[in-house]
Structure formats: structure tokens, C-alpha cells
Image (cartoon, grey):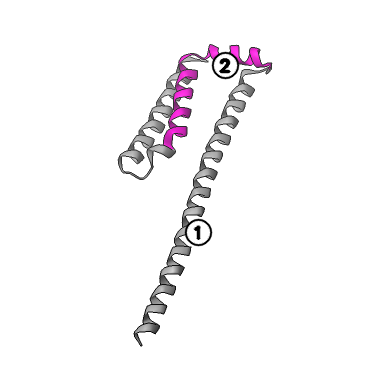
Amino acid sequence: MSINLRIFLFIIILVYLLIIINLLRKKSLNLRYSLTWLASALVLMIIIAFPELIYKFSETVGIVTPANTVFVIEGIFVLLILLSLTTIVSHLNDHNRRLVQLIALLEKRIRDLEKNKE
């Protein structure tokens, strides 16, 4: 990997980290949900700093070209992010269902109190 490419990728990852930190600072992104994004940035930084790790990992796993190894690692991170987002959506769906049930019970209670008042 050429030094120019490494510098370019390093700058891109720094911008990526600054965007994540800015979203965290503005509270647009919850820290609990940003851990996967931060971990991906850390792994990318390590790969840029030590590109020979990709070659050794490729040999160990049996992947012929290091470029394919990068795609495999990228795919793993995409799957982790999808799993994280699916977990968040499931939690929010359960929370919304409980809120709807609570609202329905409160509306029924209000109607019953209004009937008793009349």
C-alpha cells in the first residue's frame, strides 16, 4: 500500500471519526449505538497503520488476495451494524407496543370516569 494511499485513507477515517464525535456531542447519536461505528474506525486505523496484518490474515484464513480479505472484513462490519440496528428497532417496537397498550388503558379509564361522573 503506497504512502499516499495510506495518508488519504487516514484523513478519510479522521473525518469519519470527527463526524461520529460531532453526532455524539450534539446528542444526535447515542453512545451505546455508536460503539460499532467507533470499533470499525479503530479497525480501519489499525489496518492502515499495519497493512501487513491483512496479508497475514489472508494467508491464515486462506483467502487468495488481500483485497478480498478487506471485503470480507467490511462485510462482517456491515452485518454487525445491521444486527445492531435490528436490535434497536426490535427494542423500540416493543416499547411502542407497551406505550400503545398503556394509552388504551388510560383512555378506557378516562371514559369510565366520565360515565360515572354523569
Residue at the extreme front: 116
Residue at (50, 15) in percent of width and height: 2
Residue at (54, 11) in percent of width and height: 52
Magenta stretch, residue numbers: 34-62
Give the residue type at disc 1. Arg
Main SS of the magenta segment?
helix
Q: Quadrant of residue 58?
A: top right
Q: Position of residue 10 (x, y in %)?
A: 42, 23
Question: Mark 2 — residue?
Answer: 54
Residue 112 among those drawn in magenta: no
Residue in front for this viewpoint, 3 or 98: 98
Q: Quadrant of residue 54?
A: top right
Q: Position of residue 24 (x, y in %)?
A: 34, 39
Q: Earlier in the sequence, mark 1 or mark 2?
A: 2
Marks 1/2: CA–CA distance: 46 Å
Relative vertical location of residue 74 with respect to residue 52 in this rendering, above or below: below
Q: Which SS class for mark 1? A: helix
Relative vertical location of residue 49 with respect to residue 25 in this rendering, above or below: above
Residue 51 among those drawn in magenta: yes
Q: Quadrant of the C terminus?
A: bottom left
Characterize the local packing of mark 2: few (<14), some (14-19) or many (20 or more) Cα atoms within 10 angstroms.
some
Q: Position of residue 82 (x, y in %)?
A: 55, 40
Question: Mark 1 — residue?
Answer: 97
Residue at (43, 30) in percent of width and height: 38
Relative vertical location of residue 91 with respect to residue 66 in this rendering, above or below: below
Characterize the local packing of mark 1: few (<14), some (14-19) or many (20 or more) Cα atoms within 10 angstroms.
few
Mark 1 and mark 2 residues within 8 Å of each other at the beta carbon:
no
Q: Which SS class for mark 2? A: helix
Residue at the extreme left: 25
Residue at (40, 26) in percent of width and height: 11
> How many labels were placed on the picture?
2
